[in-house]
Amino acid sequence: MPVLAKGKTDTGRLSVYVRDDRPFAGQAPPAALFHYSRGSKGEHPERHLAGFTGWLQADAFAGCNR
């Protein structure tokens, strides 16, 4: 995603986390969280998901391997 940075355009990463447990009898409403970071290193999703417990389905982004 292009980001305006001090006199130039820089590239950032937008991570999107989505939940919808309704098909599995979940009581919580669906939700989407958009989280911006300055790069695409794996440390960003690790920090975003540090306290997460449960199931996670990810795309092929290598940063989610750990």
Image (cartoon, helix red, strand yellow):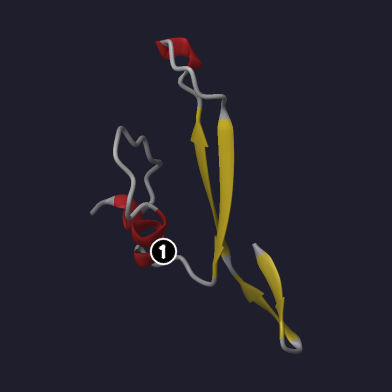
Q: Which residue lies furthest to the right in this view?
A: 7
> Tag 1's secondary structure?
helix
Query: Is 6 positioned to the left or the right of 49 in the image?
Result: right
Label 1 neighbour load within 10 Å: few <14, some 14-19, many 20+: some
From the viewer's perspective, is residue 21 above or below residue 35? above
The N terminus lies in quadrant:
bottom right
Residue 53: where, in percent of width, then height?
A: 29, 40
Task: Please tell me which residue lies in front, 13 or 20.
Answer: 20
Q: Which residue type carries mark 1?
A: His
From the viewer's perspective, is residue 20 above or below residue 5? above
Query: Is 34 positioned to the left or the right of 9 in the image?
Result: left
Q: Residue furthest bottom?
A: 7
Q: Residue at x 56, y 24 (%)?
A: 29
Q: Residue at x 48, y 17 (%)?
A: 27
Query: Is 34 positioned to the left or the right of 25 in the image?
Result: right
Q: Residue furthest front?
A: 27
Residue 2: where, in percent of width, then height?
A: 68, 67
Residue 52: where, in percent of width, then height?
A: 33, 45
Q: Mark 1 points at which residue?
A: 44
From the viewer's perspective, is residue 29 above or below residue 51? above
The C terminus lies in quadrant:
bottom left
From the viewer's perspective, is residue 33 above or below residue 31? below
Q: Residue furthest left?
A: 66
Residue 40: where, in percent of width, then height?
A: 45, 65
Q: In which quarter of the image is residue 9?
A: bottom right
Report the number of numbered marks.
1
Q: In which quarter of the image is residue 13?
A: bottom right
Q: Residue at x 49, y 15 (%)?
A: 22
